Image (tube, rainbow, N blue to C red):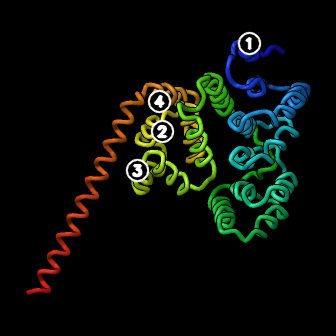
Amino acid sequence: MKYPEFRALEDRSSGSKADDLLTASITAFCCVARPAKSDAQQLEDLAVPLLALASQRVRRHAAAALSEFSHAPKRLVLALAEDEVDISAPLLLRSPVLKPSDLTDIITHKGIGHARAIARRQITDPELLRVLHEFNDPAIERALELQSNTGESGDDQMPDTMPTPESPRLRETREALKALMRESDAGFSSDQALAEHLVDAALLDQTTFFEAELAKALKLDPDSARRITGHGLNAELTIALASLGLSAEAAHLVLTGLFGLVHKDLHSLRLFVQSYRQIDQEKAQTTVERWKTQENSQKLRQKLREMAADFENGARKVS
């Protein structure tokens, strides 16, 4: 089997070899339509030792890439699933490789953060549900209640332990995501630490925390950040991410962390990448500055209204 992605390793002058090799090997594996057991074993033997040397960004990519892949090597998936929750979340949420017993072990080893992510799966196993309920955690209970209501209101759900056949659309979308990873040689952002921080915040399934971090990065009020984030993919949020210098890859991870798989086919993903890369960062920053001006203007008007009301109330008392 020939993996042309490995040739890119010879041309890379930055980044660790572990990052390069792990990205290339997982990308190559995911591009195989029907991987054999030997392919999975080869990836496992190569990738598992690299995890300790790879960066958070690449481990996060690996977890996302393998999260819906039913033929992913079990030992590699388990290793990634026990990584920090902002890295392992896609696997904990979706991986068909992880069985209830695996998820129970992960919760035992890693604690409440991983349990909160696992609680968002469609769970039917009584023992796993018991373990989750034992935390008596409001976030876990809300997630389980939501899953229960979804199952009652819809058609019969297939248990998360039974992997569904992979659709051509899902495979096509995943390949496009892998292509996006390969093309992002410039990294996440002009400010790598900020980009990774925002991606982490988006993946934590705590929208209010992300809104607070976005407000801090943009130097806006929390209410403005909440309005920009909204309830789904929107132009203002995309402009905000572009103003901070996030790459298309990082922006896509943020949006996916906040709203799920927002681009469900190859065409829409390509349109997003193309349109995002056409956003001029300086113009995006100018737009954010305009938001700040509007924000300050609204504050001033509100203050004037309050002063006028105070003056009127004082005048009434004197009279």
**Residue type at the position of mark 1:** Glu
Q: Secondary structure at mark 2?
A: helix
**Residue type at the position of mark 4:** Tyr
Q: Which residue is mark 2?
A: 241
Mark 4 or 3: the one toward you: 3
Mark 2 or 4: the one toward you: 2
Figure check: 275 above or below 105: above
Mark 1 or 4: the one toward you: 1
Location of residue 2 (image quadrant): top right
Compute the Cα span from label 4 to label 3. 22 Å
Q: Nearer the viewer, residue 284 or 66?
A: 284
Quarter that holds the C terminus: bottom left
Figure check: 129 above or below 106: below
Compute the Cα span from label 1 to label 2. 32 Å
Q: Secondary structure at mark 4?
A: helix
Q: Nearer the viewer, residue 287 or 5?
A: 287
239 lies left or right of 297: right
Compute the Cα span from label 1 to label 4. 29 Å
Q: Residue at x 87, y 25 (%)?
A: 39
Q: Which residue is mark 1?
A: 10
Badge 1 local density, few (<14 within 10 Å), some, or many (20+)? Answer: few
**Residue type at the position of mark 3:** Leu
266 lies left or right of 125: left
The numbered mark, 2 or 3, whose residue comes first in the sequence reads 3
Q: Which residue is mark 4?
A: 276
Location of residue 128 (image quadrant): bottom right
Q: Residue at x 39, y 34 (%)?
A: 284
Q: Residue at x 74, y 28 (%)?
A: 19
**Residue type at the position of mark 2:** Leu
Point out residue 37 in the picture as x, y percentages from the top left corner: 90, 29
Q: Is residue 84 visible in the rendered structure shown here?
A: yes
Q: Nearer the viewer, residue 117 or 289?
A: 289
